[in-house]
Amino acid sequence: MNSLELFSGAGGLAKGLELAGFKHSVLVESNKHAYASLCENFDAEKVFFGNVRDFNLERLDNIDLVAGGPPCQPFSLGGKHQADRDKRDMFPAAIHAIEKLKSASLNGNWHLVRTNSIERHKATSLDRSI
């Protein structure tokens, strides 16, 4: 099964998915140090350095899983609590990727796992994806 991982960080989730049998189509990361770790530990040609919003989803096909952990700072109790007004709110970008790739998927075997953070976006189009 093929995966797209957004907000890959240093690659912990990616390694777990790899060990579980997933094949990474692309790992997307915007932090230069995390990007360097990904390039060291995975196929560097499959690592995209940049903002998730700038990644071209059109180049992907046959994606079975979209994984990743959008930044939590906009929703953290230790921060400014700007939520969807914070430019670091990447949940809409993650939801867009899921919707885009789900609609392009031929197999239709999509399953979403909701987390407390995603629950905050219940009013978004994610509910239509389920």
Image (tube, rainbow, N blue to C red):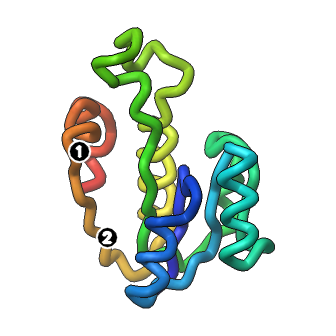
Q: Secondary structure at mark 1?
A: helix
Residue on which disc 2 sits: 110
* Residue 25: quadrant of the picture: bottom right
Q: Give residue 48's position: percent from left, percent from top.
A: 73, 58
Q: Is residue 14 left or right of residue 44?
A: left
State the separation of the CA atoms marked 2 and 1: 13 Å
Identity, as a three-letter code, of the amino acid under mark 1: Asp
Q: Residue at x 58, y 58 (%)?
A: 10
Q: Earlier in the sequence, mark 2 or mark 1?
A: 2
Q: Residue at x 48, y 65 (%)?
A: 12
Q: Residue at x 58, y 77 (%)?
A: 24
Q: Residue at x 72, y 65 (%)?
A: 47
65 or 40, which lies in front?
40
Location of residue 102 with respect to 85 vertically, above or below: below
Residue on which disc 1 sits: 127
Q: Which mark is residue 29?
A: none
